[in-house]
Amino acid sequence: VEHKETFFQTPREANSVAAPPQKAASPRKSKSPKASPEKKQKSPLKREKSTVESEKAAKCLKLGWVSTLYSVNEAYVHFEEHVDGLEKLLNEMFEFYQSQGGSLITELQIGLKCALKSNDANWYRGEIKQIKGDTCRVFNLEYGNMEIIHRTNLRVLDKQFVKVEKLIERAYFPIKPYKNEAELMKELQAIFNDGSHELNFEVLKQIKDGSI
């Protein structure tokens, strides 16, 4: 993981998502003249450089931000392609549930997908994981964190939001702790800084359950 500083602000800190810096368009490459038959052979250095560039291009690199860190090996990550969809979803959910209110959930069930009003006053999609009286432990589907929510702040998830694809990835890091795991967690939390640091991730493979 390559660490970069950025001023990216996540939707948990504001109602809208600040788009990450735009990548500069790569200049067009002019076609090089064809080599004459006498100059076809390339030097070993050129072949080595070409191999390195091919290997780099073959890697699946993605720009992203860690939203929730569960351990040194597991986290939930927003990638660059999620940003616009996440901003749109959160704005639409906020407008819908603030203006129309939405329907209260009459019967709480574990595994039920719902809309939750978080402590930051924004609305998110969630899944009920535990129920204790009128209070639920709800998994935030947009950020990967758990929240304790009273049933009065839960609503039926409107069908327009059910159709929206997932906008976060569950990621596993192949890290072997080289020191005390608690100390390593503190270092990783400082690097990830609750989603405010822009990072480059190399995706090694897709797991059967949809994780990476």
Image (cartoon, helix red, strand yellow):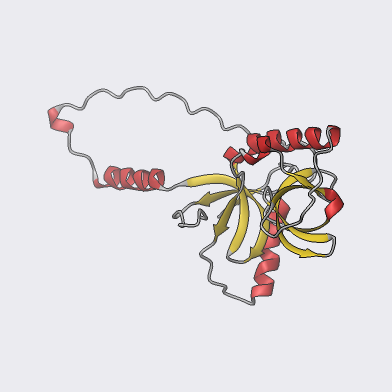
Percent x, y of residue 25: 52, 27
Q: Is residue 162 left or right of residue 153?
A: left
Whether residue 120 appears in this view of the structure is yes
Q: Residue at x 84, y 38 (%)?
A: 101
Percent x, y of residue 81: 57, 38
Q: Residue at x 83, y 61 (%)?
A: 135
Percent x, y of residue 190: 71, 60
Is residue 165 or residue 52 the one in the foreground? Answer: 165
Residue 189 in which image quadrant: bottom right
Residue at the limit of the structure toward the left, as seen here = 37
Q: Is residue 74 left or right of residue 209?
A: right
Is residue 7 or residue 168 the one in the foreground? Answer: 168
Q: Please state the total of marks drawn on the protein image.
A: 0
Percent x, y of residue 74: 59, 62
Residue at the limit of the structure toward the bottom, as seen here = 180
* Quadrant occupied by the N terminus: bottom right
Is residue 60 or residue 160 the one in the foreground? Answer: 160
Whether residue 20 appears in this view of the structure is no
Q: Is residue 196 left or right of residue 151?
A: left
Q: Residue at x 66, y 57 (%)?
A: 111
Residue at the limit of the structure toward the front, as seen here = 106
> Is residue 14 shown above or below 67?
above
Q: Is residue 180 left or right of residue 16?
A: left
> Is residue 210 shown above or below 24?
below
